[in-house]
Image: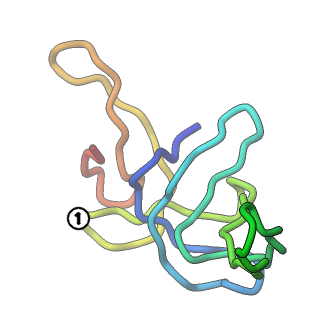
Amino acid sequence: MKIKKGDTVRILQGRDRGKEGVVLSARPSQERVIVEGMNTIKRHRKPRRKGEQGQIVEVSAPMAISNVALLCPKCSHATRVGYTLNEAGKKERQCKKCKAVIS
């Protein structure tokens, strides 16, 4: 999976289309990511202790990886990700538009 935790992404599909956010967690086996403040759903939470009230909590739900695009830190465009080998022989992510290395 080419998008990782901590990356800034732009939402391409859904009700949050066009918004930008930070990836909180990536789930490669499910091909889903959780983006901070996007794709929110309401969960009804039961009271845990005596005297505590139940509440409705808004939580960010996982969204398909195909619905987000990585934002290049250098050119600030939503871009696809490629890979290159550096001098040490390690793979690095690379912006397909400006060829900058994405850490």
How many numbered circles does the render carry?
1
Q: Secondary structure at mark 1?
A: loop
Amino acid marked by disc 1: Lys
Q: Is residue 46 left or right of residue 16?
A: right
In percent of width and height, residue 35 lies at 57, 65
Residue under numbered circle 1: 74
Looking at the image, residue 101 lies above or below residue 22: above
Residue pictured at 30% horizontal, 47% vertical? 102
Residue pictured at 62% horizontal, 58% vertical? 34
Q: Is residue 28 left or right of residue 90?
A: right
In percent of width and height, residue 62 lies at 72, 58
- What quarter of the picture does the N terminus occupy? top right
Looking at the image, residue 99 lies above or below residue 68: above
Q: Nearer the viewer, residue 72 or 42?
A: 42
- What quarter of the picture does the C terminus occupy? top left
For residue 12, what is the image quadrant? bottom right
Q: Is residue 88 left or right of residue 97?
A: left
Q: Is residue 27 left or right of residue 103?
A: right
In percent of width and height, residue 71 lies at 41, 65
In percent of width and height, residue 77 lies at 40, 72
Q: Nearer the viewer, residue 10 or 45?
A: 45
Residue pictured at 52% horizontal, 69% vertical? 36
For residue 40, what is the image quadrant? bottom right
Residue pictured at 54% horizontal, 84% vertical? 19
